[in-house]
Image (cartoon, rainbow, N blue to C red):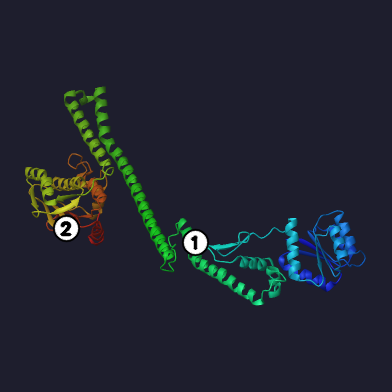
């Protein structure tokens, strides 16, 4: 806003002018005589001067002459002298405007605004916004988010007048004089009508825009929280219109996003756990291979050095060959086991009875050769859907273990009980404290420490890995009558969800 010097010797008039102009944001400097006026002009950066002519000490025309000797600042002459000669003389001395007393405060304010605008101190108001309504004063249009508002040009002029006199009281007569001119035959009630129409046009648009934008702002605030993955963030659904539908869709999308993120985090944890398991497996494999490698190295070194009985190559060369074949077999098992989780197989429809009969046939022959009774009791048909390869490998290892650890004259049984596949064998029951360790790679219980009769220690580790990869729950428990062990595979004909229920409801699982 501008700095205005008010030069008027009548203090009440001076004060009234300052009070009227103050709400417009101007800085008002009062002066009460010509000398004071010129002094204040010299020590302040003045943008406009309102100057009376009949002043004490130095007349207003003399002050104007001195101002013009050093500045082109706008000067408005405000005086009771209304003769033509004085007005002409004022304009000859480069006064910018002239008003006679008594005067209209509104008209004074408008003329000051016009002078400031022409001097570049007060640019004309081009546009204004309130809420979501924008008014273009130069184009005589108004609009909100839904488009243009139906409003008349004279209503735009009325709004501009009210805005430029913000905080001031305007009478109907002042508004009429400013908008239609002094001589226009318009009644006071015309102003009422225009103000009413202006309120209807703009206030209703503002209320409508607010009703639209408030929900949008709430959705925007909620989406900002969603960007930060705030799990409790949610868009409020306040209506059943398009905005309410938008809020519902955003909530559904965010819920799906959180679910996907949780799934990915779980998959990441699974992959990390799998990688840790592989590292542990390879570490155990490295340790397991050291024993036969050490034995082979010691034997070969003694043969090379010709130590004692190792000079008999006919005996120890075949023994070395046997150790190499054993190492080759172990390495092959380790490589196959390390690849178990690298590739998945899609579930396929299969007759479980037919598959189990085919899988058990080789072990039935081995059992017969060792005088072990092998019983297979399956329904005629058992349709199921599962990854055939991994499932076959797991069942083969379980049955192989059952046959290998059953003494002559004892029984091995494979049968179906509802949705459970059960493999039992008569043997010395394994203590509970040992059972969970049987599924660790290369672990052998004390009664089976030898590699010759205790296997490679990978059988049940492979079983555990395969069944977990297929989300198939199982249990491995000792039997009392007859003494032995029972391996149970659950939920072969149920969905994954049911399998999870079985896993929770079944006996303690390994």
**In this picture, residue 262 sits left or right of residue 141:** left
Q: Where does residue 2 sit, x and y in percent of width and height?
A: 75, 60
State which quadrant residue 46 falls in: bottom right
Residue 338: which quarter of the image? top left
Q: Looking at the image, which residue is at 16% across and 24% down? A: 314
Which of the image's four quarters has the C terminus?
A: bottom left
Label 2 packing within 10 angstroms: few (<14), some (14-19), many (20+): few
Apparent side of residue 37 relative to residue 364 in the rendered image (left or right)? right
Q: Mark 2 = which residue?
A: 419
Q: Nearer the viewer, residue 224 or 391?
A: 224
Residue 308, above or below 85? above
Q: Secondary structure at mark 1?
A: helix
Tell us which disc is closer to us: 2 or 1. 1
Q: Residue at x 13, y 49 (%)?
A: 356
Provide residue 117's location: percent of width, then percent of height.
Answer: 72, 58
Q: Secondary structure at mark 2?
A: loop
Q: Position of residue 151 (x, y in %)?
A: 57, 66
* Residue holding disc 1: 221
Q: Position of residue 465 (x, y in %)?
A: 26, 47
| Left or right: 114 in relation to 151 | right
């Amino acid at each position: 806003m501008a700095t205005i010097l008010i030069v008027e010797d009548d203090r009440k008039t001076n004060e009234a002018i300052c009070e009227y102009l103050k709400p417009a944001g101007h800085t008002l400097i009062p002066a009460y005589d010509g000398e004071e006026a010129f002094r204040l002009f010299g020590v302040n950066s003045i943008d406009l001067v309102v100057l009376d002519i009949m002043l004490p000490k130095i007349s207003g025309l003399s002050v104007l002459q001195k101002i013009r000797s050093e500045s082109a600042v706008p000067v408005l002459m405000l005086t009771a002298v209304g003769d033509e000669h004085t007005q002409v003389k004022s304009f000859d001395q480069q006064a910018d405007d002239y008003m006679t007393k008594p005067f209209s405060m509104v008209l004074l304010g408008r003329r000051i605004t016009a002078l400031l605008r022409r001097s570049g101190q007060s640019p004309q108001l081009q546009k204004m916004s309130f809420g979501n309504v924008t008014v273009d004063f130069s184009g005589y249009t108004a609009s909100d988010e839904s488009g243009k508002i139906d409003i008349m040009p004279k209503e735009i002029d009325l709004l501009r007048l009210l805005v430029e006199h913000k905080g001031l009281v305007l009478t109907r007569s002042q508004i009429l004089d400013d908008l239609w001119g002094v001589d226009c035959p318009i009644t006071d009630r015309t102003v009422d009508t225009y103000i009413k129409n202006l309120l209807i046009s703009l206030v209703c648009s503002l209320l409508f825009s607010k009703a639209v934008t408030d929900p949008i702002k709430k959705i925007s605030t909620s989406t900002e929280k969603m960007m930060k993955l705030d799990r409790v963030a949610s868009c409020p659904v306040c209506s059943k219109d398009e905005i309410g539908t938008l809020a519902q869709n955003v909530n559904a999308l965010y819920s799906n996003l959180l679910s996907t993120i949780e799934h990915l985090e779980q998959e990441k944890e699974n992959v990390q756990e799998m990688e840790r398991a592989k590292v542990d497996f390879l570490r155990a494999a490295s340790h397991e291979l050291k024993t036969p490698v050490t034995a082979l190295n010691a034997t070969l070194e003694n043969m090379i050095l010709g130590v004692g009985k190792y000079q008999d190559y006919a005996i120890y060369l075949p023994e070395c060959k046997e150790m190499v074949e054993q190492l080759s077999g172990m390495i092959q098992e380790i490589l196959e086991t390390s690849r178990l989780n690298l590739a998945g197989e899609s579930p396929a429809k299969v007759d479980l009875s037919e598959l189990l009969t085919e899988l058990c046939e080789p072990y039935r022959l081995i059992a017969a050769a060792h005088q072990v009774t092998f019983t297979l009791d399956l329904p005629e048909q058992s349709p199921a859907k599962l990854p055939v390869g991994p499932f076959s490998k797991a069942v083969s290892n379980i049955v192989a273990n059952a046959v290998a650890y059953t003494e002559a004259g004892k029984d091995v049984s494979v049968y179906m009980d509802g949705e459970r596949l059960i493999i039992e064998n008569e043997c010395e029951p394994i203590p509970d404290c040992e059972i969970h360790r049987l599924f660790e790679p290369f672990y052998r219980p004390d009664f089976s420490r030898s590699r010759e009769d205790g296997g490679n220690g990978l059988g049940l580790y492979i079983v555990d890995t395969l069944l977990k990869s297929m989300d198939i729950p199982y249990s491995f428990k000792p039997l009392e009558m007859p003494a032995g062990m029972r391996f149970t595979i659950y939920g072969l004909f149920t969905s994954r969800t049911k399998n999870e229920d079985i896993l929770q409801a079944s006996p303690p699982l390994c």
